[in-house]
Amino acid sequence: MPDAEGAMPPEVEAKEKMDRARACIRSGDLDEAIPLCDEVYRRFTLSKSPALQLQVARALGHRGAALSEKGMFREALVHFDEVERRFWSPRRPELWEGIAWGMLYRARVLLEMNQEPMCSNWLERLLSRFGASAQRPDLRVPVEMARTAVLAAHNQAERFEASLSLSEALLKEYDGKEDPFLVEQTAVSLLQRAIALQGLGHVDEALEAFDEVDVRYSEDPDPRLRALVSTALMGRAIVLLREEFLPEALSALDAILEHAGPNPSRRLLEPVNFAKFHHEVVERELRLERERRARRPKPPPLARPKPR
């Protein structure tokens, strides 16, 4: 709310900008998010107000997250280091929200860098620090996201049994809830469950699990859910390619491209590039197989038995 003279209090202004920056990161508008973070950091980095220090911590974390989405992982980690160094204290719970987001973003970046042991270490530290305070409104989202991030870490490390067990436990908590945030966490858990089943070699169950993500969320416009569906479609295609079910794999690759549309967002590019490359390979294999069948000599007709 503006003060008596019409100016918005700086704490409110900074929070609104950081809320907008996070929304921009979710939607993939990174070039809009970064200037918002820069402005809050520049204006308030020397402030002694706890409310403004929290927004500076969020600015660093969100800027790091935006950089990581651009593939600038090393630069992102520098931002998370500064959040931890400047703002973490067990005696300052008013800043914990910014710390939790910084830790979660760091863990995700480490997973993208194939540094699973370090990723798991940071997730364990986050849950150890803040798990008991998960019902606080400002900590609930990063803590729950850390719990589902553990699934991805297990799968990357090929701890498929652990991922499957935890994903099924989380689905018992999340599935059926109408809260949009928990809907997203349900989708994440379903996807990681499918990946775990694939890793364990349960082909039919994995295909069904990938299909479930597609069926449930393919029409949802949320950018995060669209990305999860694309990943599920790619997972289905990978299973079919490995099992050499080529016609079915070709249909799965077509589904990836159809879902992404003519102008895919940055988050959908990996599945799209995967689909385009393998589409050509599979089409060539199917064409060669048709040609091989056409060249095979036809068996002679069966002789009719002579009448007695």
Image (cartoon, rainbow, N blue to C red):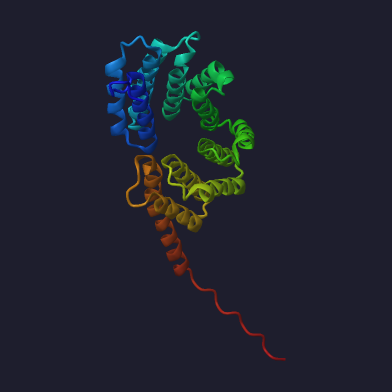
Q: Is residue 83 above or below residue 286?
A: above
Residue at 47% across / 50% down in the picture? 219
Would you place residue 221 above or below residue 107 in this image? below
Image quarter hosting the C terminus:
bottom right
Left or right: 159 with respect to 31?
Answer: right
- Indicate whether 289 appears above or below 241: below
| Of residues 187 and 48, the one drawn nearer to the viewer in this rendering | 48
Residue 68 appears anywhere in the view:
no
Q: Position of residue 254 (x, y in %)?
A: 42, 55
Hey, which quadrant is residue 40 in on the image? top left
Q: Quadrant of the N terminus?
A: top left
Q: Quadrant of residue 176?
A: top right
Which of 27/3 is in front?
Answer: 3
Where is residue 216? Give x, y as percent: 53, 48
The residue under the point 27% across, 18% down is: 42
Extreme front residue here?
4
User: How far across and down, in percent of the image, does residue 76 sit?
Assistant: 35, 23
